[in-house]
Image (cartoon, coloured by chain):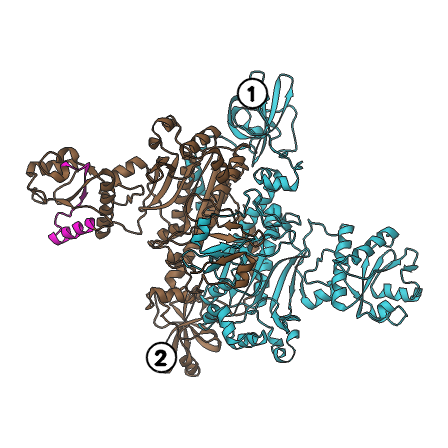
Chain colours: A cyan, B brown
Amino acid sequence: MTVYSFIFYLTFAFQKFIIMYRTHTNGELRLNNVNEQVTLCGWVQKAREMGAMTFVDIRDRYGITQLVFDEEHTKIAKSLGREDVIQITGKVIERESKNKNIPTGEIEIIVEKFTLLNKSKTPPFTIEDKTDGGEELRMQYRYLDLRRNPIRKNLELRHKLSIEVRKYLDAIDFLEIETPYLIKSTPEGARDFVVPSRMNPGQFYALPQSPQTFKQLLMVSGYDRYYQIVRCFRDEDLRADRQPEFTQIDCEMAFVEQEDILNTFEGMMDYLFKKVKNIELKQFPRMSYADAMKNYGCDKPDIRFGMTFNYIDAITKNKGFNVFDSAETVIAIVAEDCASFTRKQLDALTDYVKRPQVGAKGLVYLRCNEDGTYKSSVDKFYNEPDLKTWAEKCNAKAGDLMLVLSGDLAATQKQMNDLRLHLANELGLRNPNEYAPLWVYDFPLLEWDEESGRYHAMHHPFTSPKTEDLHLLETDPGKVRANAYDLVLNGTEIGGGSIRIHDRAVQSRMFDLLGFTKEEAQAQFGFLLNAFEYGAPPHGGIALGFDRLCALFGGQETIRDFIAFPKNNNGRDVMIDAPATIDKKQLDELFIDVKEL
Amino acid sequence: MTVYSFIFYLTFAFQKFIIMYRTHTNGELRLNNVNEQVTLCGWVQKAREMGAMTFVDIRDRYGITQLVFDEEHTKIAKSLGREDVIQITGKVIERESKNKNIPTGEIEIIVEKFTLLNKSKTPPFTIEDKTDGGEELRMQYRYLDLRRNPIRKNLELRHKLSIEVRKYLDAIDFLEIETPYLIKSTPEGARDFVVPSRMNPGQFYALPQSPQTFKQLLMVSGYDRYYQIVRCFRDEDLRADRQPEFTQIDCEMAFVEQEDILNTFEGMMDYLFKKVKNIELKQFPRMSYADAMKNYGCDKPDIRFGMTFNYIDAITKNKGFNVFDSAETVIAIVAEDCASFTRKQLDALTDYVKRPQVGAKGLVYLRCNEDGTYKSSVDKFYNEPDLKTWAEKCNAKAGDLMLVLSGDLAATQKQMNDLRLHLANELGLRNPNEYAPLWVYDFPLLEWDEESGRYHAMHHPFTSPKTEDLHLLETDPGKVRANAYDLVLNGTEIGGGSIRIHDRAVQSRMFDLLGFTKEEAQAQFGFLLNAFEYGAPPHGGIALGFDRLCALFGGQETIRDFIAFPKNNNGRDVMIDAPATIDKKQLDELFIDVKEL
């Protein structure tokens, strides 16, 4: 085992490593260090006077240590301000009043020697777990915000996750291979960031939206297990919590089927949860896209809680309620123990579904009262036995609340999904420290685009159709399922991938279906198609959103504080003030002009 | 120890992992697998007929396995072409004639079932260790070139190195923190690649030449041990073996002095050599910049061999030889056991130093003959006793050859450095499998720029002057040495760094010296200077060229084949044909025009 030689070398390295500025970090000293003379460095967290003495908390990345400045030194201590950088030497003593909340809380240091390493201006917000700084101010002074424990812990978690991802993949023969950042723009898909080339006037590189084509080329090259933790770029109008640059765990495997990939990355998730959070994932269900849409109305269901969909068309139609009668579908969910919802609460839910972002026309409810009676908002049309069949059909029990939406199938599924998640949030059913991963598979291969009047690839044009659906390619292309899958965690898609086409005949049919001429296919994907002529193995892969994965592991919803230097919703880094104008000389060298604005 | 739980989890992952396409790789089977039924996949390396049988070598990333197609199947085998992708099932048998050159050479597989997974066109060059493909063709079909063993081994070495770098740094509390790729252009230094911003019309991001400012900000933020294996970009006219995008091991530490950084990264090099190449580095000398220039005429000496400089002005001048008399300096090196060099060899050396790239006017030699006599090209001016003093001064012994250059100090040092390296190459003294690392330190802080008539920072404006030279800042700035250092390996600079200024008074003096007004300093480095107001700790760092490190570990001089998808000397990726023109629509969205060319 190489562990021993590794430890040997580290010891060796440490012996060589003479720490000059400090003997210990601020998270390190314990009772067994009492009476040692130590030197510490760090930032002044706070100071407080107690008679002739002054107590100063000194902070670094590793923790906080309490310093005691006695009468002789207290004048120095009084001159200290928050965030001053100091170095002290002194003796470790046992504290009289111990602080059990911090690991160094049993000791303190009697300061004997003091050096002010750097003075700090008063920071614009407090460097505390709960800071008084607003979002904008903290973004502007990101370097100060990064000093706060919650953000530091996020970045430490990110580091830990990346180390463990690499350990797992390295141990099962994956190779990390770096792919280029200066590549070629493709008109398909999202918008590229481009980079003008000075050496090739009038020409542009593009920054990769993902290393997709390169990883497929690597499969052609025989690197049958590739990964990369890699930056990707997408020039999209930024929705909340999207970044123009983001990090992906990008993977591809050859000589595999879908099952191999699902198992490999299910194994990775198991491993990460165990190693990073000490959680044993109990279940890792798999669900077809069709079932996800049917039962949850969305392709990334949050399965930490129930409230699955019930289709109650058969028992609700033809009772004179025109809304249901004219609807393509009627869907109900059951909110357990919510029969006691007040009128106000029900109105709020109705308002919620009627918001333009959700788009429902109204909401029908059915209270399954504790006494066995039923009360609905459509009592006019349905009698007690009718309502009872609703409850029975949906397994609603006394004390539960049923919520019903109706309309076109797709729209109603989407609305009910919104309502389900909204209600779960309200009910506290989405515990960020509970983890429910899920594979969703058998996505449709194609989606019909009304505007262009043709099919588009749902994933990308190299995604493989399922063998058993191949015959439908000619007769009913919209029904063809793909060997495509998403990894979903707590209702968030954290990864997705597919088995790729490696058979030229299938690829050719695929391009026909997508309306590509041979020339167009060659112009857009030429180098990959050429490569496929020289012995492409069966292959497939997956890409995981690393920022999002970190946020979920951190039990948070937004990715911004898991990125050291994020951009705002306008794609700006407000700390460094980028983007910015550049010199005319630079523009000239690049053979470009900025248009009159 | 976490090793066990790690192994547990991998076992768990493997159990889940059902390999469907193959039971083994092509590097895996041994005598103890005899009689097993196996399924293999891979590329056809070659086929040869032997009577009714056909032998086919099947290749993947892991190795080569010999297949035997018997009479029944030989027709299939005969139809196979090089690089076809096949899957076979068959029985492992012991070979009659074993091949000791490959790990699977004791067995072969009797093919029972065969599937052609993909046909290949005949590749444009052979996929062999020694290929018949030229550089250009191989770049165009890079995905085929990557199949060749030598390139695959390079990329595997790169992966191994990155894993071990991370292991070492992770174990001593370094955090890998990702810094942004879309940053701000700075007019100082090399040329930036820029990225027009669609959301901020007329404004541009720049791609980082290095994360320098961000890593210093992270020190201000308290992340006292940062690293990142990170892509960097430089829009320079490409010299041979430079890439517009390159990878750096970027590191920074706080609360350290130069000695701490040298020790930490010396430890890393020791560790990497031991782990990756099983080499114990015996020596890791340190040499001042002044000594390097004096003894080797360059700041990155190759110390695998001697031939250090001897300054023989005192004993060569005033003997009537005008060339030496009028020279600022006379420098000699001793080539051991080279007295027997022929006239032709000496002429070739003279021609070498007279090349415009070297620029010497001529070369003086002195043969120390085996019989104790001396023969020089300047016998006219120097008698036997004179020449003897040369030899004695330089410790040249009988059988050695002395080579002498003269002229201005800096020019002569440079020429002699060129000659020394050239001669060492000729004599085979630069063994790529011998490793001689070296720290060069105490670089000058400033260099005088004739054109602008002012000093420039040799490293960058945040590099710290040596405390003991601080007083010279006012009186003789050119003499001030910096806390800057380079890591040199076999005559190649593989890394460099410095202790940064963290004291605002020193920084201010530095900017004055560099001719910055307060406003200019603020405009260019504002966010960093602002950050320095809020408690910057003493800090310093280093960046290592990862591509170059990989090449040196691979015993090679050029980096190109240690990068999966490199660019050519015009910055082009000839495989994907990038850069390329982009749509007018894209230009319009970015508010830019391409100038008429």
Answer with left or right where residue A56 lies relative to residue B555: right
Q: As displayed, is residue A113 above or below residue A550?
A: above
Tell me the amino acid under the disc marked 2. Answer: Glu
Check disc 1 and report the residue beneath it: A76
Q: Nearer the viewer, residue A457 or B164?
A: A457
Callout 1 crowding tier (Cα within 10 Å): few <14, some 14–19, many ≥20: some
Q: CA distance from mark 2 to mark 1?
A: 90 Å
Q: The numbered mark 1 sits on a residue in which chain?
A: A
Answer with left or right where residue B557 lies relative to residue B333: right
- Where residue A58 sits, quadrant-wise, is top right
Tell me the amino acid under the disc marked 1. Answer: Ile
Callout 2 crowding tier (Cα within 10 Å): few <14, some 14–19, many ≥20: some
Residue segment shown in magenta: B325-354
Q: The numbered mark 2 sits on a residue in which chain?
A: B
Q: Position of residue A573 (x, y in %)?
A: 57, 46
Query: Which residue in the rendered view is the most extreme toward the front?
Result: A596
Task: Specify whether residue A359 is painted magenta.
Answer: no
Task: Specify whether residue B346 is painted magenta.
Answer: yes
Q: Nearer the viewer, mark 2 or mark 1?
A: 1
Q: As displayed, is residue A279 above or below residue B27?
A: above
Check disc 2 and report the residue beneath it: B49
Q: Position of residue A513 (x, y in %)?
A: 59, 76
Badge 2 and badge 1 both on one subunit: no
